[in-house]
Image (spheres, helix red, strand yellow):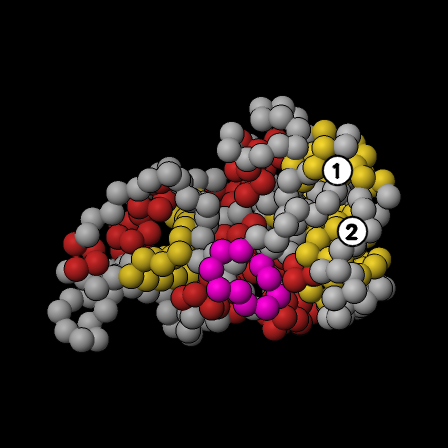
Amino acid sequence: MRSKAAIHVEHGKPLAVDEIELPDPRADQVHVKLHSSGVCHSQLHQMHNPQTPTPSLLGHEGTGTVISVGADVSHVKEGDLAIVTWVPKDPIQGRWTPELSGATYREEPLNGATYTWGEDALVWGGYVVPIDDDNPKDISSIVGCAVLTGAGAVLNTARVRPGDSVAIYGIGGVGTSALIMASILEAYPLIAVDIEDSKLEYAKEMGATHTVNAMETDPIEAIHEITGGGTDYAFDAIGLQITSEQILPTVRGGGPGADNHGGMAVLIGMPAPQMTVDPGQFMYHQKQYRGSLGATYPKKDFDQFLRWHHEGKFPLDKLVTRRYTLDQINEACDDLQNGEILGRAIMVYD
């Protein structure tokens, strides 16, 4: 069948919105008619990376209705509402990528193991997670990446507890999701760091108790002053070299002794090629530096995130601040690149 999608045809060029060809699902695949998709900064990294193969399909968070399933798929059925994501619903050890979907553009195979920037997704069944029919078909899409990445880092990687102090660098879709999760878990103080006052005001609306504009003051010094020595946890939701280097000295120091541990720095954003870290932060202060890559259990956590939304604790409707059509995808990418989007933007297909 033919379906409309955004196609990354050539580096440095706008995405082409055109028809692609989709085969019938393989035994392990699911065909989902998409209602919406998030617009994630990770796709900008892909589009700007000369190593990304082309032509390719992009996007990895969407909500849709299951149209058909392969013979080996049993956890979803035709008619189910489901989230398409990039984290396998069942844990898999190590990094693993399924084979290409089989989609083609002008008879050329399209790269991309999962994709949501299009009207239809034909993906490996493990990337499709059923949700209850009473969930919103638009804003639920961001659970598939922004929420699972940011909230998962706080909930499952750091395991923040009430009264823990938290700093979050970067108030985009992922950073705001981390902020909301930390607020739900009653972190205090909960400090948002960004370079845009508009994003810091937005962070206050989403639960931040303190804010720091890193263009106006040294964020490490400011956070140490607020907390009296550093936070228990610091999260980098940006991935720039400077922020990746700032989060470790942001957290409190420990010292000698079996349980005299310092704080934990957690890198969430896609990282720069390199960074410099003072090894004394580890040795003398017993600090930890962790990576967090989609640290969520989709089968369990997706339902919880959506339940919290219904209860007003995790306001997906406030997290989504802009909407685009598929034909506006290049405008959406430009707005995201230029820092003009608070929270998360989505594309709505119907």
Please name the residue shown 31% across and 47% down the image.
246
Confirm or deny contact between disc 1 and disc 2 (CB under 8 A): no
Mark 1: amino acid? Thr
- Residue 266 visible from this viewpoint: yes
Per the rendering, the mark at residue 333 is none
Please name the residue shown 77% across and 30% down the image.
106
The image shows residue 245 at horizontal and vertical percentages of: 31, 46
Q: Residues within 10 Å of mark 2 (few under 14, many from 20)?
A: many
- Mark 1 and mark 2: span between their CA atoms? 18 Å
Residue 93 included in the magenta stretch of the image: yes
Label 1 belongs to which residue?
A: 104
- Which corner quadrant holds the N terminus? top right
Residue 290 included in the magenta stretch of the image: no
Q: Nearer the viewer, residue 331 or 13?
A: 13
Q: Is residue 176 left or right of residue 2?
A: left
Mark 2: amino acid? Leu
- Residue 84 visible from this viewpoint: no
Q: Quadrant of residue 73?
A: bottom right
Label 2 belongs to which residue?
A: 34
Magenta: main secondary structure equals: loop
Please name the residue shown 62% across and 26% down the image.
10
Q: Secondary structure at mark 2?
A: strand
Q: Is residue 267 left or right of residue 121?
A: left
Tell me if residue 52 comes above or below residue 261 in the rendering: above
Q: Comparing marks 1 and 2, which lies closer to the viewer?
A: 1
Which residue lies most toward the left here? 256
The image shows residue 128 at horizontal and vertical percentages of: 69, 61
**Range drawn in magenta:** 87-96
The image shows residue 307 at horizontal and vertical percentages of: 66, 72
Q: Quadrant of residue 234?
A: bottom left
Tell me if residue 299 comes above or below residue 285 in the rendering: below
